Image (cartoon, grey):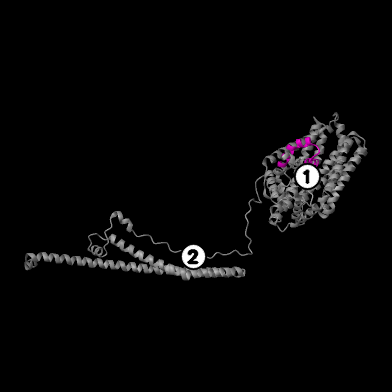
Amino acid sequence: MFLFSSFGGGGGGVLLVFLFLLVNLIIFHLKFQEFSLVLLQVVQGESEEERREEKENDEKKEDEEEEEEEEEEEEEGEDGEVDQEREGEEKELDLEKGQVGGAVVEEKALERISDERDHFHVSMLQRLNPTNPLRIIINSGTRVATPSPSHSSRFQPLPPPPRSQPPPPPHRSQPRSTPTPQQSVTTLNSRRFTNKISLLVFMVHMVVAVALVCFLIFKGIQGLIEASNPAKEKEERVLKFMLPQVEVASLLSITLAFAWQKALREWPQVMVYFIIWCTFFMSLSAGILLICFQKPATDGVGVCFISFAIGNGLYACWVTQRIGFCFKVLLKSLEPVSKFPDLNQPAYWMLGSGFLWMSLWILAVVGALNFYFPPLIIIALVLSLAWTTEVMRNVVNITVSRVIALYYLRGMQSNTQFCFQRALTRNLGSACLGSLFVPTIEALRIVARALNLLEGEDEFMFSCAHCCLRVMESIFRNGNGWAYVQIAASGKGFVRASQDTWAAFEREEMVPIVDSDMTSAICFLTGVCSGSICVIVVAAWTAKVYQPFIATISLLAFCVGYLMTRIAMALPHACVSCYYVCYAENPENRLFDKTIIKDRINLIKSGRDVVVPTPRVPRRFTR
């Protein structure tokens, strides 16, 4: 009241204005202090962030220097060229870090700090009340309009840019001493069973064959016990005059088989000639001996032996130019055998099993005489014996092929026992399927070559053989004896392995070489030679004790001698097959003699070497 009375009525309005200004001044002062504190905190926070970043950069640089020092210590033993390349890369890296990188990083840091400050000021303005005098003063000085709600999102503080990543460390070149691993397309340790249907059929066949043999042995014993049995006398004659000769033929064939194998490994050059001509003389001698008995049955069997001897002699004259290459391949392919002392064990097991099975088999033949339809039963037993022994041979073939193929392809010395178990389990289906088709294919191959030699003699014959030759061309591609190597090494099925193997031969231009290979013929002739020797021994023995059995025992002895010898000769045959197939897979392998096959291919291309190719359709039929 005193103040109002002092200044009068107008003085009261002036006092109110003065008080309003004083209050706004006090508020402005307080807001200014608050703003100053916030700015100080922001500046201090930025300085702390910069110090933290500098500290982190220093730590990273120290870590990089420590890593570089460790790398330099690890790489002291490397070659000088690698050290020079690394030093050049480190110098370039330091140059980029010290000169160019430093300026760029500093410039980006300054730009980032200024952007953060601008965003801070805008965010502070957004938080001020629009009626606040401080905002009015700042807006009037900076002429910044009040942001509307629709545009407020434009002034939100942006996230800080990502920190510059340190440059990647220099690429460490691989030392020369460490070979670059190569991925294999196909595994060498496949665990799946191949050709399961063939395996199932063979196992069913074996169950039936064992049951039939046991039943026939029982019938034979029953016939011998019963005194009133009319077949008793016949069975006694068979046991007395046939069983000893068959057992002797089995033992003789096993002895000859290992003799052939050992001699072929020791003297390949001599044995190639010896096997060819010894087979000629032995088969001719067996035929002449059988004809001398002057019986219709023996005359028929003797004519067959003499005919084969004539063909064998023609073949020996025909392949004279290829014998040199044959023994070179034999000599080179048999070298790894000495590194595996137990490589013949699968052959021992198969020959022992074959001997026991043949002993039971001949007793079953005796029992068949005391049952219905003896000729049909004996024919079924012969076919079963042929398939079983062929499977035994291919089991040995696959076992040896896996051992030798892994030695060529991977430089491994595999366990023969493990490979043998694998051949008897996982690859047995392929062995069963190949045992059915490969002998047939080889027989058709011989026929086709004979037809090829008669080209131009008879147009009618070749017009009929046109379709057969086309079919055989497909058979050679989809089923051949070379497939056992890939079956053993890669675990492929029989058809797939045949196709891949033939494709590899075509890729390396080896088809004429493998087509004219003599190894399978040599192994076949050793079986024929052993069979002929068994025929001579058994026929001479039977002629002294019981002549009516001469023809029957001669055929049986020949089959036993041939089959048992082929089982043992699977080892050199598998070694040669591995040499060809593995060479086609990797011709640059140091384990191969590059001059043998390459020189042969060059001679064939130049026309200076004579080969016998796989029979193809004559040109006049392809027009």
Quarter of image, res 127: bottom left
Neighbour tally class for label 2: few under 14, some 14-19, many 20 plus, Cα within 10 Å:
few
Q: Which residues are magenta?
A: 446-474
Rendered location of residue 527, percent (x, y): 82, 45
Q: Residue at x 76, y 37 (%)?
A: 465
C-alpha distance separating marks 2 and 1: 71 Å
Which amino acid type is marked by label 1? Ser
Q: Is residue 135 above or below residue 347?
A: below
- Mark 2: secondary structure: loop
Q: Is residue 548 above or below residue 130?
A: above
- Label 1 sits on residue: 353
In the picture, measured across the screen, residue 302 lies left or right of residue 443, that is right
Q: Is residue 49 above or below residue 359?
A: below
Q: Main secondary structure of the magenta part?
A: helix
Neighbour tally class for label 1: few under 14, some 14-19, many 20 plus, Cα within 10 Å:
some
Q: Is residue 47 above or below residue 212?
A: below
The first of marks 2 and 1 along the sequence is: 2
Image quadrant in which the N terminus is located = bottom left
Could you tell me if residue 617 is visible in this image?
Answer: no
Quarter of image, res 44: bottom left
- Label 2 sits on residue: 167
Rendered location of residue 115, percent (x, y): 36, 64
Tell me the tag on residue 109: none
So how many labels did they put on this image?
2
Rendered location of residue 310, percent (x, y): 87, 42
